[in-house]
Image: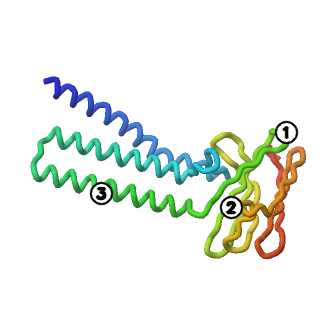
Amino acid sequence: MRNQEFFVVEMIGVKRFFYADLAVWLAFPCVVFAIWCADCDLLIGDSWTAFRVQCVLNAIAAVLGIAMLTLRYRETGRTFWNRAALGLSAAGIALLLLSWNFLCLLLDEGQEYHSFSSPDGSHTVVVMERVSLIAGEVTLYERINPFLIQFKGSMTTDDGYRPVCAGDFSLFWEEDSVRLIAGDGMGGEATVSVGLGGE
């Protein structure tokens, strides 16, 4: 009797976590899409992009989903067909979410973020370097809170060249603006000048 009561409590606890994670898992892409529509992006620190957060949510959903299936299997009996259904369902969940994670990591590949604060500490900009098969890209964002960055401007570099990582760049701060000068990987320089704080 005690084992049955413990099982019920365990099942309820896992269900609560699963449904809470499912709600966040379903809502998160909608939130990210709304952020992108506002010409912003999600970035926590210098590494946690929307795609990486989605990967974590996918992993948690997979673990909780398989735990739910396992508890359901214990509740319904350990017949061959139950084992087969559990195995197929667990494999399907794992395959779906691993495929999604692979896509997220593929979209997030080749990006590096660097944060810089103004001398008076009133503004912070984030420089993103991305390498593609055709050309490199340097994008300048302004951090508007610990979670969001807002697009300000961009420049193109030679394929595979990361001027910030190479130290081939300069930032010039003014009151509410900043100018980024970076090498383009071909012996020249590119410049992006932007206003900050809603400018």
Q: Which quadrant: the N terminus?
A: top left
Residue 129's disc is 2
Inter-mark Cα distance, 1 to 2: 25 Å
- Which one is in front, 187 or 178? 187
Disc 3 marks which residue? 92
Residue 59 percent coordinates (x, y): 41, 49
Whether residue 20 sits left or right of residue 14 in the image: it is right
Looking at this view, name the residue that lies furthest to the top.
2
Q: Residue at x 26, y 28 (%)?
A: 9
Q: Amino acid under label 1?
A: Asp
- Which one is in front, 144 or 105? 105
Looking at this view, name the residue that lies furthest to the left.
79
Inter-mark Cα distance, 3 to 1: 53 Å
Disc 1 marks which residue? 120
Q: Amino acid under label 2?
A: Glu
Q: Residue at x 62, y 60 (%)?
A: 111
Q: Which residue is drawn at 70% across and 53% down?
A: 114
Looking at this view, name the residue that lies furthest to the right.
174
Residue 185 percent coordinates (x, y): 76, 72
Q: Quadrant of residue 108?
A: bottom right
Q: Is mark 3 on a helix, strand or loop?
A: helix
Q: Is mark 2 on a helix, strand or loop?
A: strand
- Which one is in front, 183 or 85? 183
Inter-mark Cα distance, 2 to 3: 36 Å
Residue 185's disc is none
Residue 115 percent coordinates (x, y): 72, 49
